[in-house]
């Protein structure tokens, strides 16, 4: 009898040890490389746990889900980006996911003087929509009331830094950028343009030419004055930036030998 009891005790002890070792293994750190977890709106424990298992940050999504629920972390899930690493065990990961992550946003930076094609390339790189979607959307000049005569929204996408959510589409991006431009069209500026007999589109075009032509900010008023005088008397602007734009080139790319300066450009 004693032998039987001893055998049973030994088996139970072995099972306990195996269970403890298994639990420690499943709950422990994996040593995986650093990874970023993206928690989107509406994501729950099951999706988060599955994502962490795919990233090899946890060994069992089921066990991690239990940890999230046991610690109450499942009730504190917020959308965001979470920087995690394989040195964290399940409990540490649960605390991180229940904390505050980085905002889910991409930042669009439009420098002054950028052409529409450059803006589209950057937007495509941010993954907000396809190049074709942006090109189509930016041809819709009805998004802004000051675009009479313009073939697209080039010049009306105000240069600035814009934060967007990753799921933002092309139309919302266009509306945001043109709305920022509209803030610059003040009543005082409209009155000044009326006195100069310029439309907003002509103003934008002239400003773009002056910006490229001027070497310094302080030179812009003088250059703008020269161009306005030429327009007043019906004289051609005779500006290299207009040639570069018409040929879809940068100023340094213009080649006199190739006949660039003999082309009839706007």
Image: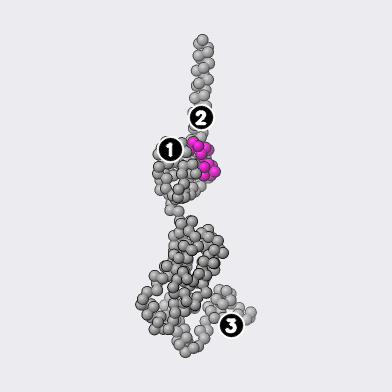
**Residue interval drawn in magenta:** 50-64
Q: Which residue is mark 3?
A: 264
Measure the alpha-carbon separation of dots 3 and 2. Answer: 80 Å
State whether residue 33 is above or below residue 149: above
State whether residue 160 is above or below residue 207: above
Give whichever of 49, 111 is nearer the camera: 49
Note whether residue 162 is visible: yes
Picture mark count: 3
Image point (46%, 36%), residue name: 66
Residues at discs 3 and 2 in contact (Cβ within 8 Å): no
Spot occupied by residue 156 in the image (x, y as percentages of width and height): 46, 71
- In the rendered view, how is the structure colored? one colour
- Please state which of the two labelled residues, at mark 2 or mark 1, is closer to the viewer: 1
Q: Which residue is mark 2?
A: 21
Q: Which residue is mark 1?
A: 69
Spot occupied by residue 116 in the image (x, y as percentages of width and height): 52, 69
Q: Which type of secondary structure does the marked residue at label 1 adopt?
A: helix
Local crowd size for mark 1, using a 10 Å CA cut-off: few (<14), some (14–19), many (≥20) = few
Whichever of callouts 3 and 1 sits on the residue coming sooner in the sequence is 1
Image point (53%, 65%), residue name: 134
Q: Which type of secondary structure does the marked residue at label 2 adopt?
A: helix
Residues at discs 3 and 1 in contact (Cβ within 8 Å): no
Q: Quadrant of residue 252?
A: bottom right
Residue 218 is a magenta residue: no
245 horizontally vs 218: left or right: right
Figure quadrant of the C terminus: bottom right
Measure the alpha-carbon separation of dots 3 and 1. Answer: 71 Å
Image point (46%, 46%), residue name: 43
């Amino acid at each position: 009898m004693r032998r039987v009891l001893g055998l049973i005790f030994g088996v139970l002890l072995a099972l306990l040890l195996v269970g403890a070792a298994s639990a420690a293994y499943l709950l422990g750190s994996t040593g995986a490389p650093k990874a970023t977890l993206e928690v989107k709106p509406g994501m729950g424990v099951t999706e988060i746990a599955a994502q962490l298992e795919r990233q090899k940050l946890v060994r069992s999504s089921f066990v991690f889900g239990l940890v999230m629920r046991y610690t109450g972390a499942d009730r504190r899930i917020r959308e965001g980006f979470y920087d995690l690493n394989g040195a964290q065990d399940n409990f540490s990961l649960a605390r991180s996911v229940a904390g505050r992550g980085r905002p889910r946003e991409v930042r669009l930076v439009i420098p002054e003087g950028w052409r529409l094609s450059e803006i589209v390339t950057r937007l495509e790189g941010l993954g907000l929509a396809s190049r074709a979607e942006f090109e189509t959307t930016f041809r819709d000049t009805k998004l802004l009331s000051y675009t009479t005569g313009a073939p697209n929204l080039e010049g009306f996408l105000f240069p600035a830094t814009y934060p967007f959510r990753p799921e933002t589409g092309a139309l919302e991006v266009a509306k945001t950028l043109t709305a920022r431009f509209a803030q610059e069209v003040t009543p005082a500026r409209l009155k000044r343009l009326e006195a100069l007999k310029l439309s907003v589109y002509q103003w934008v075009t002239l400003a773009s030419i002056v910006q490229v032509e001027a070497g310094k900010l302080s030179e812009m008023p003088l250059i703008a004055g020269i161009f306005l005088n030429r327009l007043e008397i019906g004289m051609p602007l005779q500006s290299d930036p207009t040639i570069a734009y018409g040929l879809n080139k940068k100023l340094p790319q213009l080649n006199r030998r190739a006949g660039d300066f003999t082309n009839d450009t706007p």
